[in-house]
Each structure stands twice: as structure tokens, then as C-alpha cells.
Amino acid sequence: MLGPPTRRIWQGERDASALTEGLDEQDSELIERVLEMIGQYERGERELPDEALAAAPEAVRAAIIAKDNAALDVALRELSPDEAQQILIRLVRAGVLTAAPRAESDETAEEKMARLTREAENAVTQALAGGDIAQRSALAARLEEVARQAEDAEKEDSRWLALAIRLRELRDQLTQPVNQPDTEIQGLVMSS
């Protein structure tokens, strides 16, 4: 049932009620989401993936095209932390890069802790760069929840406690007044 409304969207139609008429709830939601994304692109609120990729430095672009995470890491480390952070945010917002979850069974404890730390640092960086108070509060609550899980995972002398401490440090950054610069935030994207 998605064929006819999809063709009409390609022809330039943007009336959600007309495009979703006769569709079930799931298909209607899909069409509405597509229209929302198209509207973001048309209003200049969202960048096309090809545009964001073309604007990235050559080494970053080549690593992404080759799907080479190690080369991407090297290319980003050659940039200033600010520049790397801005490029990553731009690429994620345009949908060029996403955080792909790995199967937990494939990860060692150390890899999982490093991944959780990176994800938390990136989320905090993005929330501080463009999130509102509600988003920062929700992220702070989630960081506390994961910190508690880390504490519960092992005994007191465990490496998991270090993860809990780091997550709480990140949580505390979210509660700092917005107008006070935090110099530690500058390098978060590149830390591992």
C-alpha cells in the first residue's frame, strides 16, 4: 500500500492527510515521518548525507567510504578536538554515521566499558552542544541509572566502579550552568 503515496511524494505532494488516506496506522506513521524528514531538508534544518560527507576532510571521507573505523579514528585524531567534534556531530545529524550496537556476546568486559564510556561522552557532548534542559535532565537520569547498574555488576574493587564514577562525572557536567564554559568537554569526542 505504500507504492501510491510514495510515487505522489516523489511527484512533490506534501499533504499528509491526503497521502495517508486509507493506510493503516503503521504505514501512516511511516509516510508522516518521511514527510517530516523531507520538510527538514527543504527548510534547511537537516543536511543531506552527501553534502555532510562532501564537507568532511578527505581522510575522514575516505575512511567513511571505505567503512574503515580504524582509519576514521586516525583521521579524526589528526584534527583538533573541536574540529573533530563538529565534524562528528554534523555527520551524525545528517545520518552519515550512526552508533551501531554490537552484540553483547562479542564484547569483552573492557570493550563494553570503553563503549559505554564513549557513548556516554558523545551523548553528553551532543546534549551540551544542542540539547535543551529536558534532554540534558533525561540524559543525566540515564547516566545515573547505568552507573548504578555498573556498581551492581561487580564487587567494590572492580573496574566497573571506575565506569560508574566516570558516568557520574559526565552526569554532573549536564547540571553545570550553560553559560559557564567547561574546558574538559572540548576533548570528549576523541577520548577512548
Image (cartoon, helix red, strand yellow):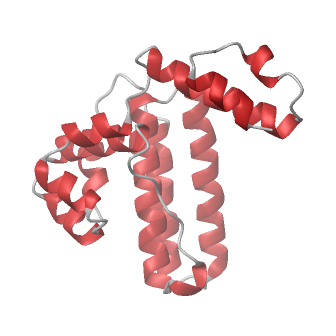
Quadrant (top left/top right/bottom left/bottom right) for the N terminus: top right
Residue shown at the point (41%, 53%) measured from the top left = 121
Q: Nearer the viewer, residue 43 or 158?
A: 43
The image quarter containing residue 148 is bottom right
- Mark count: 0
Residue shown at the point (45%, 68%) measured from the top left = 115
Residue 44 spot, x, y in % from top left: 40, 17
Whether residue 138 sits left or right of residue 60 in the image: it is: right
Residue 69 spot, x, y in % from top left: 29, 68
Residue shown at the point (60%, 72%) measured from the top left = 150
Q: Report whether residue 158 is seen.
A: no
Instruction: Relative to 150, say whether 184 is above or below.
Output: above
Whether residue 33 sits left or right of residue 66 in the image: it is: right
Q: Report whether residue 119 is seen.
A: yes
Residue shown at the point (65%, 22%) measured from the top left = 8
Instruction: Relative to 179, say whether 77 is above or below.
Output: below
Instruction: Relative to 82, say whether 121 is above or below.
Output: below
Residue 104 spot, x, y in % from top left: 59, 79
